[in-house]
Amino acid sequence: MTNASQNSRIHPVILSGGAGVRLWPMSREQYPKQFLPLCSERSMLQDTAGRVSDAARFADPLIVCNQEHRFVIAEQMRQTGRGAARIVLEPVGRNTAPAAAVAALIVAEQDPDGQILLLPADHAIQDQGAFLQAVATASAAAAAGLLTTFGIVPTAPETGYGYIRRGEMVKDHDGAFRVAAFVEKPPREQAERYLAEKDFFWNSGMFLLPVRQYLDELERWAPAVLDACRAALARGRSDLDFFRLDEEAFAASPNISIDYAVMERTEAAAVVPCSIGWTDVGAWSALWEIGEKDQGGNVCHGDAVAWDSRGCYVRSEDGALVALLGMENAVVVATEDAILVAARDRAQDIKPLVEHLKTQGRSEPLLHRRVHRPWGFYQSLHAGDRFQVKRLTVAPGARLSLQKHYHRAEHWVVVNGTALVTRGDEQILLRENESVYIPLGTLHRLENPGKVPLNLIEVQSGSYLGEDDIVRFDDHYGRS
C-alpha cells in the first residue's frame, strides 16, 4: 500500500447531477432540489459548499454537474462569496464512479498526493462539528492509502438505504474500520436486525479518496471508466468559466457507481462511522423527519396552518395560505402552478406520478413558472389566445442574446431599473415607466447597463409563442 503525505490537501468535489423527482412540485427537471432552500435559507448546493468553506482545511470546491445547470450553479456559488475552483460539465449522466474519476484526474495534475472529498449536493447535515471530525478521521485513513466512506450510525430500521458492515479497526487509526461488506437495501426484519447488531451503518454516498489510490484501483477494477474519463478530459474544452467534457468520450464510460466499480471490490475500503445529523433528502418525508415540529408533530413552511392535524408536512411556496383540518400523516406542498397532496408514507412513490404527468406532455415536471437564465429569469404571469405576459428580471451588467422571432412581436415596459434596447439599427435607453415595441422579425437585444436589477413586463403577441421561436445571432453565454 502506497502512503500519501500526512499533509495531503482535501479537495471537495460536489456532485450535482440529480433530478430530485420525489420532491416535486418544488424540484423540477430544469431546476432540481439542490438549487432550492429546502433545509435553510440557502440552497442545498450552497449549504454543501458552506460545509467545506474553511480555507485552512479545504481547497476551493470542484463541481461536477449537468451542463444544463451551469449558469445556476455559477451564480449560486458566486453568492457564497468563495466560488468554485472549477465547474466541470457532464454532457450525459454516468453515475458517481466516472464523476469521481474526472475529479481525481484534474486534482492529480496539481496535487497528486491530494485527497478528494466527494459530497452529493442534495444531502442535509445538521452537526457541522461532528462532520468535520469525521472528515479528519477519514483523511488520516486516506493518507494511509485507504478509500474511505462515511457510515451513518442508524437511528431507525431504514429500508431505503444501503448498509455497510464494519470489520476490524484500522491499525493506528481510531474511528476508522475496514469494510467487511456492502449490503443492498434490506427488508424490514433484516434492517431491524442491523439496528440491533451495532456493526451496520447507513451508506451515506460520501467518500474521502486519496487521488493516487483511487486512480490505481480504477485502473485495476474499472479500466473502461478511467480510459473514457481520460479521453473526455483530453478532448474537452473550456467554455467561459466552465470545462466541457467531450460528449462522445464521456458517453463511452460505463454508467456505474463508485460502490460497484471499486468499493465493493477493493481490499483498501474503510468506513468511518459517524453521527452527524445526516439525511439523504430524497422525499418530503425526509424533510418532515428533520423539520421543527409543532405539538401535533406537524412541520409547516411558509403561509401554512395545520389545525387539529397530526404528523403532517405542509409547505406554501406561492404566498397563498394553505390550511389543513383534521388530517394525519399527510404531505401538502403548494407552488404557484401545482399542488401536491399525498400520504406521508407514499412520499417515495411520487416519481411514477411525475412520469405520468410527463407522458401527458405537461410542463410542470420540467419547469417552474419562474425560469432561470444566465442573464436572470423570466416568469409567466398570464397567457391567452395569441398573447402572453411575462415578467423579466435582468441582472446588473447582463444582456440577452441578439435575436429575432418569426412568429411574435413584443412590447416591453420598464417597471424599475434601466434598459438598453437594440432594435434594428437603433439603440434606445429606457427608464421606469417607459416602453418600446419590437415588431415581428426585428433584430433586437435587451441589456441592463445599470447597477441594480432591471425589472420589466413583456407582452408577447402572435401566432406562436413558444420559447423555441428564437433565432440567436450573438450570445454572450455561448448558447446556440
Image: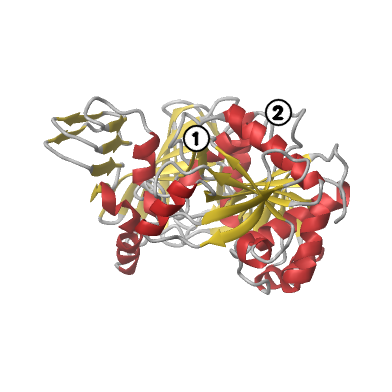
Location of mark 1 (residue): 277
Residue 464 place in picture, x, y as percent = 37, 61
Residue 9 place in picture, x, y as percent = 81, 39
Q: Residue at 55% of width from left, 34% of height from top?
A: 47
Determine which of the numbered discs, if any, sits on residue 242 in the image: none
Looking at the rendered structure, the secondary structure element under dot 1 is loop
First reached walking from the N terminus: tag 2 or tag 1 = 2
Q: Amino acid at mark 2?
A: Asp
- In the foreground, 304 or 219: 219
Question: Left or right of 232: which side holds 329?
Answer: left
Which quadrant does the N terminus fall into?
bottom right
Q: Residue at 22% of width from left, 31% of height from top?
A: 321
- Residue 361 lies in what quarter of the image? bottom left
Looking at the rendered structure, the secondary structure element under dot 2 is loop
Which class describes the residues within 10 Å of circle 1: few (<14), some (14-19), or many (20+)?
some
Question: Left or right of 207: which side holds 457?
Answer: left
The alpha-carbon separation of the residues under discs 2 and 1 comes to: 20 Å
Q: Amino acid at mark 1?
A: Gly
| Whether label 2 touches label 1, CB < 8 Å | no
Residue 35 place in picture, x, y as percent = 50, 42
- In the foreground, 216 or 170: 170
- Residue 462 lies in what quarter of the image? bottom left
Which class describes the residues within 10 Å of circle 2: few (<14), some (14-19), or many (20+)?
few
Q: Residue at 46% of width from left, 46% of height from top?
A: 33
Location of mark 2 (residue): 54
Q: How is the image coloured?
A: secondary structure
